[in-house]
Amino acid sequence: MENLDRLDLRILSLLQEDAGLSNAEVAEQVGLSSNACWRRVKRLEERGVIEKRVALLNPEKLSLNVTVFVGIRTNEHNDRWLTNFSRGVAAIPEVVEFYRMSGDTDYLLKIVVKDIADYDRVYKKLISVASLHDVSSSFAMERIKTTTALPLY
């Protein structure tokens, strides 16, 4: 958050809420001219603060009704294995998030699929990617909170 002033934070907050806002709309809401707002947004993009702008889709409207969190443990802890595993997981489109963890779980994946049979298909792909010690799947029963907005202070 270094070198971000209150106007930058307000711009980021507005764009997190609705990246489809026009520059003129953002400028009006933060009290800047369109040119000044555009320059700030460009600077935030160039610095990598704004990585990209996307449309958020409703998974249920696309019949993607099952979210699975998969914890993976491995006995392999070397660069070659990690590179192979990372490439394999990255090639599975149903894996929407992928983290290397501390603690008992080495890797945590968030997978979004149509149903249990669809997850089984993805699971078979996943276990063929690399040797795994343990794969533990937990199915989300209800989505209580989901957001892409980061807390801006």
Image (cartoon, rainbow, N blue to C red):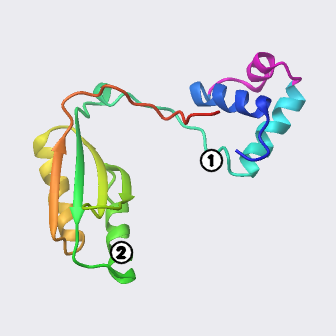
Seen in the picture, residue 120 relative to 14 is either above or below; the reply is: below
Task: Specify which label sits upstream in the sequence, 2 or 1.
Answer: 1
Q: For the C terminus, which image quadrant?
A: top right
Query: Is 11 or 106 nearer to us in this picture?
Result: 106
Query: Is 49 or 33 nearer to us in this picture?
Result: 49
Q: Residues within 10 Å of mark 2 (few under 14, many from 20)?
A: some
Q: Residues within 10 Å of mark 1 (few under 14, many from 20)?
A: few
Q: Position of residue 56 (x, y in %)?
A: 46, 32
69 vs 24, left or right, is: left
- Residue displayed at 16% across by 60% down: 135
**Mark 2 in CB contact with mark 1 (< 8 angstroms):** no
Q: Disc 2 vs disc 1: which is toward the camera?
A: 2
Q: CA distance from mark 2 to mark 1?
A: 25 Å
- Residue displayed at 79% across by 45% down: 3
Q: Amino acid at mark 1?
A: Glu
Q: Position of residue 63 (x, y in %)?
A: 25, 30
From the image, tell me which residue sits under label 1. 51
Label ID, residue 5:
none
Q: Position of residue 8 (x, y in %)?
A: 76, 34
- Residue displayed at 22% across by 72% down: 74
Q: For the N terminus, which image quadrant?
A: top right
Query: Is 69 or 126 nearer to us in this picture?
Result: 69
Q: Amino acid at mark 2?
A: Leu
User: Would you identify the image quadrant in which residue 72 lies?
Assistant: bottom left
| Extent of the magenta region | 20-33
129 vs 120, left or right, is: right
**Element marked by disc 1:** loop
User: Would you identify the image quadrant in which residue 42 lies?
Assistant: top right
17 vs 7, left or right, is: left
From the image, tell me which residue sits under label 2. 82
User: Would you identify the image quadrant in which residue 4 lies?
Assistant: top right
